Amino acid sequence: MLLNSWSIALLLCGLIVLFLMGLAARSAIRVLLFWNPESDSNRQIRLENEIWLTSTLVEYALGIQIISLIVFVLAADFYSQSIAGAMCATGSLLANSFGVPALLVKIGGVFFYGFWIVLHHLDIHSEKYPLVRVKYIYLLFLIPLLVLDLALEILFITGLKPDIITSCCAVVFGDATGGGSNLLGGFTHGLSMGLFYGTAGALILLGVVLLERWQRWLGVLFSSGWLWFFLLALTVVTTEFSSYIYAMPFHKCPFCILQPEYHYIGFVIYFALFLGAFFGMSGAVVEPLRFVEGLEEGVTGYQRSAVKLSLLFLVFFVLVSSYHYWRYILIGGEG
Amino acid sequence: MNRRLTQHLNVLDYALSSLWRRRAKNLSVLVVFSWVIFLVASFQLVTQALTETAASVLRSTPEITVQKMSAGRQVEIPLDVSTRLAGIYGIQEIVPRVWGYYFDEVSGANYTVMGIAPGRMPLLDRLQLTLEEGGVYDQESHGKAVIGRSIRRTLEEKGSTLLSLFRPDLSQASFEVTGVFKPEVDILTNDLVVMNIEDARDLFAIPPAMATDLCVYVANPAEVPTIAKKIAEALPGTRVLTRSQINRTYQVVFGWRSGFASVCLLTALTAFVILAWDKASGLSPEEKREISILKILGWETADVLAVRFWEGILVSGIAFVLGCTLAYAHVVFFNASLFKPVLIGWSVIYPEFRLVPSFRLAQFLLVFSLSVLPYLAATVIPAWRSASVPADSALSGM
């Protein structure tokens, strides 16, 4: 299935990101080899200039990577039209063993590039650029991830054969009794709802406490809480909320909510969840940098705004994702 | 937050004025860029429209079609095979169909002649809905036909009310026209003549106990694959086509053709990216002086980069809107005359039909990632080069 517009767009995005990050890596190697803040030689001035280039390149790469993540899911949905048995993106992602890993690596990639940009902004906040080495070593570690991403994508696309029989989302995410595997098979409806709203409430409480007074262990708890909530929310949206959005009890799918039939509500839901999770988790990621000379103020400032933003997105996410469920309950449905 | 917003608005304002100052250079990029986006978007819209047309056309076709094959070619199927299918549970109706192509020497056109027994079609009431005027002929009556619009046009040109066709032995068969199909279904019916199945057999000289193929209607769509498999087992030597198979084939063919077209367009895109890179890299002495003056005034590299970023976004945004609008006009008003032959295949007798593009976010995102992203990537390095012009270079020329 390599020769169609969606595959070409995906490969093009992948190659562009690789090109941009390759250029960034070239600067990174130069910076790691020759960086000397004491010197005022021509080379040092050139390197200081190149820092701007790399940050712009990574920012562009992040933007393109986010678009390519959306294109990937939409492309999977497009492929499902020509694969026997597949009715939406789930079917084509499961059509071979590279679909789901490719998606996970892409999602992971978005978070890792984002963390790099946070590091960069903290770094340029200080006049001495204290994080230059850390930042560029991190950048070099991103390259293998990127290559893996592109490789999985190519394997996934070339492995798609229009005559392979695959499952549709109703089977994959359906009830355990339906014969398919269920991600939250062991959880009852009440338990998963309780966990979802309980965790969201706990995160809000923790966030408010953190905004009052930052405490390290609470910050770490907040961020790990977000990681747990991120995974929980993805499964709860899939197994609980999605069927209320579709108004079909057996249709449980994380991808169909991205379709125009459901007013693209999935984009709003995932956008809020991803941004919330990113800001929520990055608070703890930057915590060790507090001890770097000249960064304490920047880190504190960043953590405050990150907690604020993550709470904002959390509330928004909970409201939007559970809207259909609560509307159904309020007009007299049974939970 | 507010301060940063104001800062960005000011940068945007500056970017706009800077674009306007170099309007000749930017206009050339804009024109070429819009043209590239127009090409990519036209292809996508046409593909989407054709795929949807194919899907909507197939919605009313029978779930399963059974054709007899001999030496790899389709031949007539004896009617008595349908008794062998009677035992398969879930089949609602088996309707024999006689159809073929008729070359009209006078007008030089090919007609599709189809003979059906209207009483046995489960969707008969729908057939009536597709007629512009007149009605469906009575099931028992002979010598009557329902025709497509282009055939009526030929009849009107001839000044005749009867449709006269010739049998293989050159004897004449005349048909009274009872109804004409609506323009909305032109893609299917423009060249179509529907008549009684016995009239069609008579016209093509097909023996009475034979048909061209059998249409099998299935009550429960979920059972179609199982029933198709059972038919294939019961009737070796036949080809059993299901509707979803045909639909998938269309999807793959259109997908492949549009992919092939995209590959061809990639060359245009590459040429454009090189042009954009070149235009963006060529820093004139005035631009250099402008940037170094800005730096003396206190601008930082990041600010100049932000200006360049906004310039890129503005140029690509305008080109994107322009290109997509032109593509839409091309598909709607000019019926995609530039590309339709590539996608639907080449034929002089292809029925005329209007394409209806549908707006889906996914299509635009696809066009965006095929055109705007390469442009943005191509202008990063030149943007950085111009942003890193040192502040003192303004003084060197004085």
Image (tube, rainbow, N blue to C red):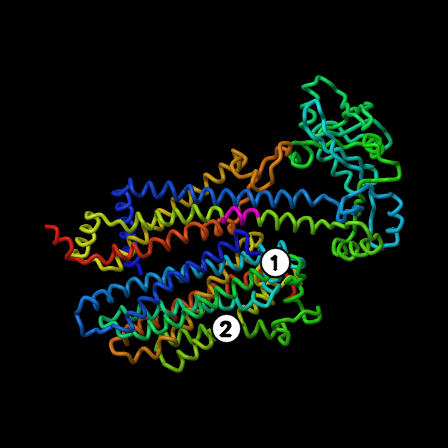
Magenta residues (range): B257-263
**Snapshot quadrant of residue B342:** top right
Closest to the observer: B95 or B6?
B95
Q: Which of marks 2 and 1 is in front?
A: 1
Q: Mark 2 points at which residue?
A: A229
Residue at 18% x, 74% y: name it: A38
Residue A88, which numbered label?
1
Closest to the observer: A286 or B200?
B200
Q: Residue furthest bottom?
A: A217
The chain carrying label 1 is A
Residue at 38% x, 49% y: name it: B273
Place of residue B104 in the rendered image (x, y in percent of width and height, measured from the top left):
72, 26
**Snapshot quadrant of residue A322:** bottom right
Near mark 1 (Cα within 10 A), the count class, few <14, some 14-19 or many ≥20, is: many
User: Where, quadrant-wise, is the C terminus of chain A in this rendering?
Assistant: bottom right
- Mark 2 or 1, nearer chain start: 1
The amino acid beneath tag 2 is Phe
Query: How far apart in space, not on screen, are marks 2 and 1 (Cα)?
Result: 26 Å
Side of B48 relative to A209 (left or right): right
The amino acid beneath tag 1 is Cys
Q: In this view, does A120 lie above or below B337?
A: below
Q: Magenta includes A84? A: no
Q: Is the magenta stretch mostly helix, strand or loop?
A: helix
Quick one: SS at disc 1? Answer: loop
Place of residue A138 in the rendered image (x, y in percent of width and height, measured from the top left):
37, 73
Residue at 65% x, 71% y: name it: A181
The chain carrying label 2 is A
Residue A71, which numbered label?
none
Residues flagged by tags 2 and 1 on a common chain: yes
Q: Which residue lies furthest to the front in this view?
A: B71
Quick one: SS at disc 2? Answer: helix
